[in-house]
């Protein structure tokens, strides 16, 4: 009956979302009077899960699963859910987990709710609140099947420490050859860069920057803050920045703690994509820019004057804090 | 090659979202509907396969008669034929089940659906179809080429992309990147005229219960006004972010 989470890792180390899932699952498990089991795939050291209330971990170590293979991973999660007789299976909202969750839900004949924000509103019937209409509204969804699959929107719950004694168990799900119908040939990933998906802080810039040659200060600001860089749709369409940086309704969603928009007017589609971020700061010459309506803090002025000053001030702030 | 492109009929991205009937129904009053943008990237790639590799492109939607203009637009862009499954889509599973049935009966080699729709944002339909049919499945697909039965694709991952190989039959969860924004097509007059005479088949849904139900909608609470900081006083901004917002 244990709640099952898929505790995701990259290169053998847990992603932060794994701890958010654990914290979330622990809370639901306490209300339901049950425990939390995690499944890990090729994660080196799983002991950290005991800081966030996980009671048991099923460790899969299989060289065949070294590259991400959705069908095989989904199959492993399904078998873990069956072994634990789990009624609630919780995944994150990373690209990989969003790939897996529908496959897991079909194989368990479970109802699936994605983009879940916050704890279940009711457990019987099982109702969760989720983001919908590109963050322009919330939808309360009832899952009517005995088994439920959820994917939790990043940063919507938070990470809470909760010491537990963690039982570790090796787990060898049977993986079929047919699970490998899609094979990874190569991975292109910028190393050492904070990704938009993982970042707590995102620094984003728009057409107000006038040209790609002016991005140096944006990158520097991001470096000072340990942030990821992002851009608006016109900037990516113009080829000033790579597509992977485009955030908004048709680009990547951002759910950061802090989102700083520089020279971005704030078209409704852009706001939809970043609105799950907790704190929004806008820097823009135009005081009428729509972004000011949704931001928490704003500075009216020229980015070319403000950003370099802000970098200097943040550097001395960081040195003293 | 037979391609099926799954089209979702969604409010235009600039729409204001409102609800009626005690916040249990989406208010379509004054809302312009469009082809779901993620689906449109897939459709445009499918038309490329039609023009360059002789593929036949069918578009399908699960919805009532009010969604037909959206299908006609897809025909005007260049799809060969259209299917409408005459049912009110109750949840993602129900839609996937209907589409899986269409695919089983239609002998399609490649199925392209948007990775998510911009209304319910479920992000589940392509994966569920793959799960129901056991097809190969590539989600968040940003590039796709096909030679014979062999497929090379790129998939977006957090912080980069992955190049993958696969075989037809295949299901794609598509998005921007399958084609670029500038490659999207606005139907021309000739396209619109020929679309009127292209075949639009209406089929009745297969039974199949939903697994989720929408209970109610809610709009986010109105935001408090922005706190403006003078450009000459950036220390105050840093102090607010540190002491008040506690994000740095």
Image (tube, rainbow, N blue to C red):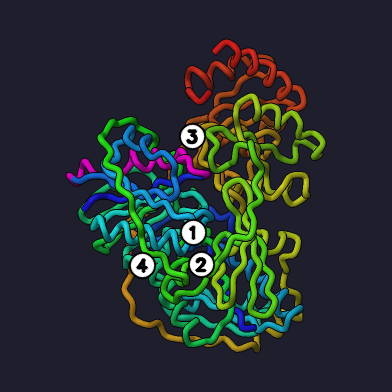
Please identify, in this view, whether the residue under mark 3 or under mark 1 is nearer the observer: 1
Q: Nearer the viewer, residue A150 or A249?
A: A150
Q: Nearer the viewer, residue A50 or B140?
A: A50
Q: Which range is magenta?
A: A11-33
Residue that sits furthest to the left in the current view: A33
Q: Secondary structure at mark 1?
A: helix
Q: Main secondary structure of the magenta part?
A: helix
Dot 3, crowdedness within 10 Å: few (<14), some or many (≥20)?
A: some
Q: Which residue is mark 1?
A: A64
Q: Chain of mark 2?
A: A
Q: Which residue is mark 2?
A: A180
Q: CA distance from mark 4 to mark 1?
A: 21 Å
Q: CA distance from mark 2 to mark 4?
A: 17 Å
Q: CA distance from mark 3 to mark 1?
A: 39 Å
Residue A301 spot, x, y in % from top left? 71, 25
Badge 1 or badge 2: first in the primary sequence: 1
Q: Is residue B19 magenta?
A: no
Q: Secondary structure at mark 2?
A: helix
Question: Does residue A269 appear left or right of residue A62 in this picture?
Answer: right
Q: Residue at x 51, y 67 (%)?
A: A180
- Marks 1/2 in contact by CB < 8 Å: the verdict is yes
């Amino acid at each position: 009956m244990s709640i099952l989470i898929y505790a995701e890792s990259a290169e053998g180390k847990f992603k932060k979302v794994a701890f958010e899932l654990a914290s979330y699952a622990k809370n639901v498990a306490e209300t339901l009077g049950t425990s939390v089991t995690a499944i890990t795939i090729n994660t080196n050291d799983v002991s950290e899960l005991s800081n966030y209330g996980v009671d048991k971990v099923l460790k899969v170590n299989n060289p065949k699963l070294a590259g991400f293979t959705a069908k095989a991973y989904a199959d492993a999660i399904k078998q873990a859910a069956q072994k634990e007789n789990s009624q609630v299976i919780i995944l994150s909202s990373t690209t990989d987990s969003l790939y897996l969750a529908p496959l897991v839900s079909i194989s368990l004949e479970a109802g699936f709710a994605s983009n879940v924000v916050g704890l279940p509103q009711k457990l019987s019937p099982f109702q969760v609140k989720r983001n919908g209409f590109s963050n322009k509204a919330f939808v309360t969804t009832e899952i009517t099947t005995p088994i439920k699959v959820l994917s939790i929107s990043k940063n919507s719950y938070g990470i809470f420490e909760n010491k537990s004694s963690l039982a570790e168990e090796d787990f060898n799900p049977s993986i079929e050859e047919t699970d490998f119908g899609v094979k990874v040939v190569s991975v292109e990933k910028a190393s050492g860069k904070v990704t938009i998906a993982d970042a707590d802080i995102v620094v984003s810039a728009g057409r107000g920057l006038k040209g790609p040659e002016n991005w140096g200060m944006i990158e520097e600001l991001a470096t000072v803050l340990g942030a990821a860089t992002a851009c608006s749709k016109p900037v990516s369409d113009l080829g000033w920045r790579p597509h992977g940086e485009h955030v908004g309704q048709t680009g990547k969603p951002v759910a950061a703690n802090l989102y700083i928009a520089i020279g971005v007017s704030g078209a409704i589609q852009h706001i939809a994509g970043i609105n799950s971020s907790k704190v929004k700061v806008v820097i823009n010459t135009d005081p009428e820019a729509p972004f000011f309506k949704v931001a928490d803090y704003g500075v009216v002025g020229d980015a070319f004057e403000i950003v370099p000053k802000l970098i200097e001030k943040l550097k001395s702030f960081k040195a003293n804090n | 090659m037979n391609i099926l492109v799954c089209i979702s009929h969604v409010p235009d991205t600039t729409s204001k979202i409102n609800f009626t009937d005690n916040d249990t129904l989406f208010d379509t009053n004054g809302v312009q509907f469009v082809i779901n943008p993620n689906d449109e990237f897939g459709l445009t790639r499918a038309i490329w396969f039609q023009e360059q590799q002789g593929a036949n492109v069918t578009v399908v939607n699960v919805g009532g008669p009010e969604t037909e203009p959206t299908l006609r637009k897809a025909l005007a862009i260049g799809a060969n034929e259209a299917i409408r499954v005459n049912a009110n889509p109750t949840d993602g599973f129900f839609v996937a089940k209907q589409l899986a049935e269409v695919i089983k009966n239609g002998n399609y080699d490649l199925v392209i659906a948007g990775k998510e729709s911009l209304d319910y944002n479920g992000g589940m339909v392509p994966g569920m179809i793959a799960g129901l049919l056991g097809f190969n499945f590539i989600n968040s697909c940003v590039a796709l080429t096909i030679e014979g039965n062999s497929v090379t694709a790129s998939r977006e991952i957090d912080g980069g992309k992955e190049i993958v190989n696969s075989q037809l039959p295949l299901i794609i969860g598509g998005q921007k990147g399958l084609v670029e924004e500038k490659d999207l097509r606005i139907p021309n007059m000739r396209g619109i005229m020929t679309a009127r005479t292209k075949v639009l088949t209406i089929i009745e849904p297969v039974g199949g219960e939903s697994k989720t139900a929408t209970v109610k909608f809610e709009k986010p609470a109105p935001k408090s006004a922005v706190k403006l900081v003078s450009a000459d006083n950036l220390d105050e901004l840093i102090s607010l972010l540190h002491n008040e917002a506690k994000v740095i």
